[in-house]
Image (spheres, rainbow, N blue to C red):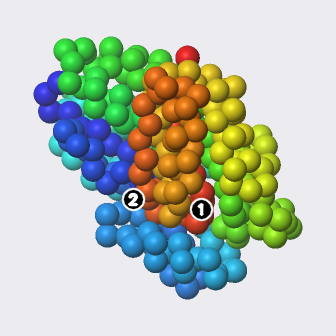
Amino acid sequence: MQNYKIVADSSCDFTALDGACFEAAPLKIITSACEYTDDAKLNVEEMVSTLLTYSGKSSTSCPNVGDWLGAFGDAENVFCVTITATLSGSYNAAMQAKAHYEELYPGRRVYVLNSLSAGAEIGLILHKMRELVQTDLSFDEICAEIDAYSKKTGLLFILESMQNLANNGRVSPLVAKMAGLLGIRVIGKASDRGDLEQLHKARGEKKMVEMTVQTLTDLGLKTGKVFIAHCLNEAAAQKVKEALLAKLPSVSVEIYPTGGLCSFYAEKGGLMIGFEKV
């Protein structure tokens, strides 16, 4: 496809997409002491380290309409995906930008997908977008293919800490404190509603790996792609990959670090796993 652009907010974990015209509109992580912009310049490890000792309130800020318009650039065909609208205003802002862009430039088209997810699942969708724009399909046909594909992907998350979720008001401080004291890993998924659904609790890394692999297969993983994004925990990501390949040799697994926004929510040690369902 000629004159296209693939766009996401920075919850996708990527600042570049090899072989595609791509841009990520940054979200921001805000504390009383500092504001972090989730772009290629952000030192994620430093941010995570600083937040480990921070106990005040924190919040996030999504791209505004102007940010999205800047990301669209001057492309005739824009394919955009956002973090779940249940947890962020990013999708609504992108939809407002779409309406303004199409009114300003008659004939140009913008597609916006509410991922109902974040992180590694969005990564899978972006790679599918890149594949589709390299075909001879029309704009509408590509949109239909993306819609269908997004219904066949899922997100599993594994958290060692929930301090930032507590500081952000997502979980109770007591729940977060107990998880940290007991060494419990919380395993959950992005629900069909686009919110976070807790599934299991695992004590210790070995049990976490076993339960993660079993949960992925229970949720429909048999073959296809798996993206494992980790927050400063490549060793655990590698163990999950090895266990997955031992049980499902035909899957393709890619490991990479989380960006700023996903590192904020996953916290040090956390994993976010995007996977294709049957």
Instruction: Name the residue: 37% across, 36% down.
Output: 126
Which quadrant of the view contains residue 185? bottom right
Tell me where residue 235 appears, x and y as whole percent: 52, 57
- Farthest bottom residue in view: 33
Q: Residues within 10 Å of mark 2 (few under 14, many from 20)?
A: many
Q: 120 and 216: which one is in front?
A: 216
Q: Which residue is mark 1?
A: 269
Disc 1 or 2, which lies upstream in sequence? 2
Tell me where residue 13 appears, x and y as whole percent: 42, 52
Q: CA distance from mark 1 to mark 2?
A: 23 Å
241 w.r.t. 13: above or below = above
Question: Which numbered disc covers residue 38?
Answer: none
Instruction: Name the residue: 36% across, 51% down.
Output: 14
Q: Which residue is mark 2?
A: 26
| Three-letter code for the amino acid on which mark 2 is drawn | Pro
Which quadrant of the view contains residue 60? bottom right
Q: Is residue 45 left or right of 164 when viewed as pictured?
A: left
Tell me where residue 173 appears, x and y as whole percent: 81, 68
Q: 261 and 223: which one is in front?
A: 223
* Number of marks: 2
Instruction: Name the residue: 44% across, 69% down.
Output: 44
Instruction: Name the residue: 15% across, 33% down.
Output: 3
Which quadrant of the view contains residue 178? bottom right
The secondary element bearing badge 2 is classed as loop
Tell me where residue 215 appears, x and y as whole percent: 69, 33
| Three-letter code for the amino acid on which mark 1 is drawn | Gly
Q: Residues within 10 Å of mark 1 (few under 14, many from 20)?
A: some
